[in-house]
Image (cartoon, rainbow, N blue to C red):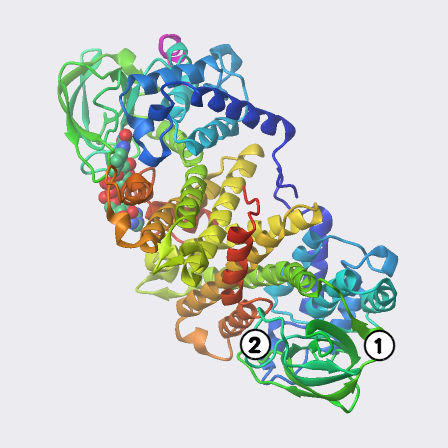
Amino acid sequence: MDLRFSDEQLMLADTIESICEQFYGLERIRQKRSADDSCPQEFWQALVNAGFSGLVIDEEFGGAGLGLLDAVSVFQALGRHLASSPLLVSSLLAARAIDILASSTQRRQWLPAIASGDCVVSVAQLEAGCGYGSSSFITTLKKGKLNGEKILVPHASLATHLLVLATDEDNEMPVCCLVDTRQSSLQVSPQDNIACAEVSRVTMVDVAVESECIVYNDQFWSLWQSAMSYSAVAAAAECNGGAQAMLSMTVEYANNRIQFGKPIGAFQSLSHYMAELATELEGSKTLNHQAAWAFDQGRDWHLLAAQSKLQAGDGFRRTTAVGTQIHGGLGFTREANPQLFFRHAKLQQLLMWDPCFLEQHIASLMLDTRTETQ
Amino acid sequence: MNFEFSEPEQRFIDRVRAFIAREAEKNYADEVMAPEREAHSQLADSPERREFCRQLAAEGLLGLSWPKEYGGQELPGIYDYFVNEELAAVGAPLIGKGIGIIGQTLIEKGTEKQKQYFLPKILAGEIEFALGYTEPGAGSDLASLQLKAQRDGDGFRLNGQKTFNTSAHFADWYWLAARTDNSGPSKYHGITLFLIPMDSKGISVSEIETMACHRTNEVFFDDVRVSAADVVGEVDKGWELMCQALDYERFTLFTYSPLRLKFDALVATLRDWKVAGQAALETDHVRRKLARLGSKLEVAKMHQRRVICAAAEGRVPTVESAMCKLYCTELGQEICDTAMDLLGPQALLSEGVDEAPLDGRWESALRATVVDTIGGGSSQVQKNIISRRHLGLPNPN
Ligand SMILES: Cc1cc2nc3c(=O)[nH]c(=O)nc-3n(C[C@H](O)[C@H](O)[C@H](O)COP(=O)(O)OP(=O)(O)OC[C@H]3O[C@@H](n4cnc5c(N)ncnc54)[C@H](O)[C@@H]3O)c2cc1C
């Protein structure tokens, strides 16, 4: 047994750290005031130039062919900086979905483009009134035309394409389609939200889809869920990174802020919270690593992935709630960073599978199919 | 990164499992492998438990981490933990304080005579100890203990009281911490460890009943005469030895497998359970609760793995153990509590009542697990350790 990251994995994280510091520091994120403020183009470009857009895409498609655990190391580092970019949605979720759902021709067309950064594919799944558990979409595909409205579509301004989930009118089955974002029948409008994250409503009125851009699969829904599981592991890593940063910031503050003649960290009503958070975080990180490791090793991993996202999302949320409290009034102000983490934690907890969905999903993996969890 | 046990570790774990499977076939299995009775099989003064300990010894599972010259196998300390995990998974007696706290300390600091007398007996599983640390005025703040050990010729005379000394009513020997000097620069100086016969003249033991079937004792000392040869290590310098032993205790004594057992038992009970006429496992709120517990259980396992890993790297896993103990013991209580909530009022019924689910297991487990977050360093003490040693927060005092 060895629970340490390899030197290569640590180096990946270091590279991310320096890219974040150079192009997308917390100061820049603090300035964001609305959902149409996308992540800096230079930041995304730096990630692409360093090869991160092809990190987990197979070498045969021009990627680096690395494992999910490598991606976890990357996303933990991104999470520490709250540095959101199309990386998660395009290079993990969309790429993974295309890899396991699409035809070989489609894979050859799209995966190299995503790996090189030429194409940035965002995913349009959620609709008003239906969450992650629903496989019957109001958005329809009928005679090669998409109609419907999607919400919370991430990073649409940097996306060249959208992977749109819809109901195929012919057989009432879910499908997905790859569509160009630059067409007038497809309207993107930013949606303001808790974290000023770049998410949008996408309205489609008779959006034409070429037949080679439609992804059919007999097992569409279960494979889609598998692609979501995969991305949820990376999203959980991002949460753990965020929680780690918030906890370190809070500990540092508690060591320096003096009240009643001593550092407030000496008060057990605060230090014990932090000890609990640290304990949850270490457990959550190890669980996250185990999920990624199990995937890379070809073992049962779906349950671990879901458990990891549930724990990491909850942990991030709790860490920021407590951490903000420990910062006192300062934690409430725009000028300081705790509020940033606070707002992003709720966002990240609810996106890429929310706790309510996860509970149901975990229950069915754990109780209905007798998955081995020993 | 690798989450698998090494090949030798896995082989060893398989060997322990095979041993347990053989023992489970024997007549006494009901008595010595009784997870539903919580600490009973581990603490009872029963001939079956003693016999089981002898079998553990005969199988060569005691003293794994001891040096070869004392009959050990010089394996890493984590092997003792592997044995305990497997034993705990069937509710069997653990390898106990003789091997860890007492044996380890004697090997390092004991006199030749002490080693010769005690070590073979410990290895053979033939000797029972009671641990005499806690006093009415010294619990978490153990170093403030005041049981008086006064010089008397070449020996000492003991006067005072200990409390919560489990097994004191049947143990053969008493591992005792007493105050030999009160004038030192700090409370940590002046504590001396003794190893004395439990039946020494002047010792009286009286039962403390608890809310679970976990008997413990008060022990009174009335001019108990002990000789200089009963001292372990140096006079006045016992504290350091106690700390080392406590570190070891924390990482070998707190096991994860009882949590898994409880969770599996709960799911099994709920498979045949109905809530308002509906199968419990098809009821949304039951499923959600189980999903949460199951996820936390996996986190608990991760903490156990972190302890194993740190120990395998040759570190004393102080922080990892503190986190593991804190998380696992709190979760153990949560599992019991949730089990009772999900099963409803019927779960209140005790062992022997026909309608009691799992023969009263849940109500008794809820009572029994209370001590887990108190003994062996309370949850608050663990949080102090984590705050200071892991996070670098200031000492509250
Ligand atoms: C069933 C049972 C069996 C036992 N067996 C043995 C045995 O065999 N041998 C033996 O020597 N002892 C034994 N003990 C004693 C056990 O180790 C002590 O109960 C334990 O160390 C706690 O001490 P206390 O009970 O005096 O509680 P206290 O130390 O008085 O604690 C009371 C409360 O204060 C909290 N607290 C204390 N200090 C701090 C602090 N610095 N910061 C924050 N909170 C704090 C505690 O967490 C707890 O919640 C046993 C106890 C029980 C109940």
Q: Residues within 10 Å of mark 2 (few under 14, many from 20)?
A: few
User: Where residue B135 sits: x, y (%)?
Assistant: 21, 34
Q: What crowding class fits label 1: few (fewer than 14 Cα within 10 Å), some (14-19), or many (20 or more)?
A: few
Residue A318 is situated, as x and y percent measured from the top left of the image, at 45, 64
Q: Main secondary structure of the magenta part?
A: helix
- Residue A94 appears in view: yes
- Name the secondary structure under disc 1: helix
Query: At which x and y percent is residue A126?
Result: 62, 76
Residue at mark 2: chain: A
- The residue labelled by disc 2 is A130
| Mark-to-mark CA distance, 1 and 2 | 27 Å
Q: Which residues are magenta?
A: B109-119
- Amino acid beneath label 2: Cys
Residue A170 in which image quadrant: bottom right
Location of residue B377 with respect to B46 vertically, above or below: below
Question: Quarter for ligand 1?
Answer: top left
Location of residue B23 with respect to A188 vertically, above or below: above
Q: On residue A129, which mark appears?
A: none
N-term-proximal mark, 1 vs 2: 2
Q: Is residue B391 visible?
A: no
The chain holding disc 1 is A
Question: Which of the two residues, B294 or B61, is positioned nearer the viewer here?
Answer: B294
Report which residue position mark 1 lands on.
Answer: A211
- Residue B55 point in image, percent of width and height: 42, 15
- Residue type pointed to by label 1: Ser
Residue B76 inside the magenta-drawn segment:
no
Q: Nearer the viewer, residue B283 or B223?
A: B283
